[in-house]
Every structure is written in structure tokens, then in C-alpha cells.
Image: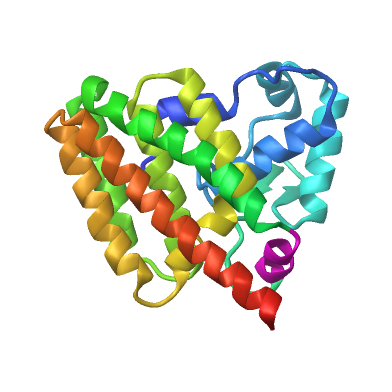
Amino acid sequence: MRRRISHSARTAMFAPLDQTGRVEAVTRRLVDAITLGLLSDAEQLPSETELASQFGVSTVTVREALMALRQQGLVETRRGRSGGSFVRAPQDAGGGWWRERLRAVTLSDLRDVGDHYVAIAGAAARLAAERSSAEDVERLYLAADDLRAASGAEASRAERHFHLEVAAAAQSPRLTHQEVRLQGELGALLWLPAGHQGAHSAAHEEHRAITEAIEKAEGDLARRLTEEHILEAIDRLAELHLGLMES
């Protein structure tokens, strides 16, 4: 599915890094772009020179980051006139990887990051209600409806995409950067329950309600609905964590 990604969301992902020369930072930014759906499956990445210019790093740093992505199976390099580096989006958000990652965090960690995320996402929803354009609202409805027919890995990516679009609609580059960072830190786990049967149906209705509040410029309602939506996801994740630890 080719998603309709807002320009501001993609711009935030490719903004210059605070510190140059860090392969890990470039790698993490590109991993986030791929897993969040900002870069589509089979999409060709900009050249090494272009990426280096956008991130404010050296081409050597970009080259090493792309090598790390190839080792993770998220990028493939093709030779020849039509060659380059192409995205290979992960197809399965299930599997066993998340169990080990969820075991490695504590409930305190989940709550701490979750509280931060609630604050950022809630503020973004309130500002989106004040600042969003008709085009922003239309994009939000489309992003919300993506979840209705999604399942598995697509459901998780649809969740993350929706909240990224809300941040972009807030017209605040700092909030969008924070959303991207928190999605990279917790998003793959936080929205994991969305890929489970039945969960994404309720989430779709919640996305629609948030979008309607933004469309009607009801900022406090948009913030409250967003905060409740995320807190429910954190509670589900905490239950999964406890279940894994008990088993």
C-alpha cells in the first residue's frame, strides 16, 4: 500500500542531525523512516551524497549506515544504470523479536516513555485542531481509514503513521521531531496490540473520533481522546509484558 505521507513528516525525518559523524544516528533515522512508512517498500533512496547533505554528515558516515541497513535486511543495493539503494520494508511485525525486546524493558521504563509520549501526542492533537488545513484533515481521515482494513504488520504501521500525521498537522517541526523520536524508541512495541485480532477495529474508531475533533477545531477534546487512546495502548502493552514475565 502506497501511503499518502505529508511533506512535513518526511522533512522532519531527513532534517540535519544534531551531531555529525554518528553512524548510529543516521542508521536509526533511516530505520525509523522505513518502519514508520515514510519510505515505501521498493522506494529508491537518495544518493549517498544527497543523504549526507540532508543529514549534515559525511558520505562515509552514510555509506556505513547503509551497510548496517543492508545487514538488517531493510535496504538492498542494485548495480547498473538504474541501480542504487532501495527500501525493503519489513513484512512481519509479529514473529518473536518483540517478546525479547519487551522482556528487556521494565514497567517503569514503559510508563516513563509512555508519559512522555502522551504529553507530546496530546499537545500535537490540540495544536492540530487549531492549525490544520483542510488538506491536513483529509490526510488524517485517509490515515485513519488505513487501519480499518489493515492487519498484522500493516495495522501497526497504520497506527504509527496516523499519529505522525497528527504531529505534522500541528505545524510544529519540534513536535514532529519528538513524535518521530518517540515512535522510534517505543512505537514498534506500543502499537503491537493493534496488529492483534479485534484491537485495530476499536483503534480505527478512536482515530476517526480524534480526526473529527481536529476538524471541528475542538482542541481540548482532540487532546483528551489522543491521550486516552495512547494510555489504553500502554495498559495493553503492560499486560503483555507481565504475561511474558510470568511465563
Asked whether residue 81 is drawn in magenta, I would say: no
Asked whether residue 102 is drawn in magenta, I would say: yes
Reply above or below: 232 against 25.
below
Q: Which residues are magenta?
A: 97-104
Q: Is residue 4 left or right of residue 217?
A: right
Residue 82 visible in the shown view:
no
**Residue 43, image x and y in percent?**
56, 45
**Majority secondary structure in the magenta region:** helix
Q: Is residue 63 left or right of residue 121?
A: right
**Residue 170, image x and y in percent?**
34, 25
Screen quadrant of the N terminus: bottom left
Q: Is residue 122 left or right of residue 181?
A: left
Q: Residue at x 84, y 44 (%)?
A: 67
State the image quarter where residue 145 is shown: bottom left
How many labels, in total?
0
Q: Residue at x 29, y 28 (%)?
A: 126
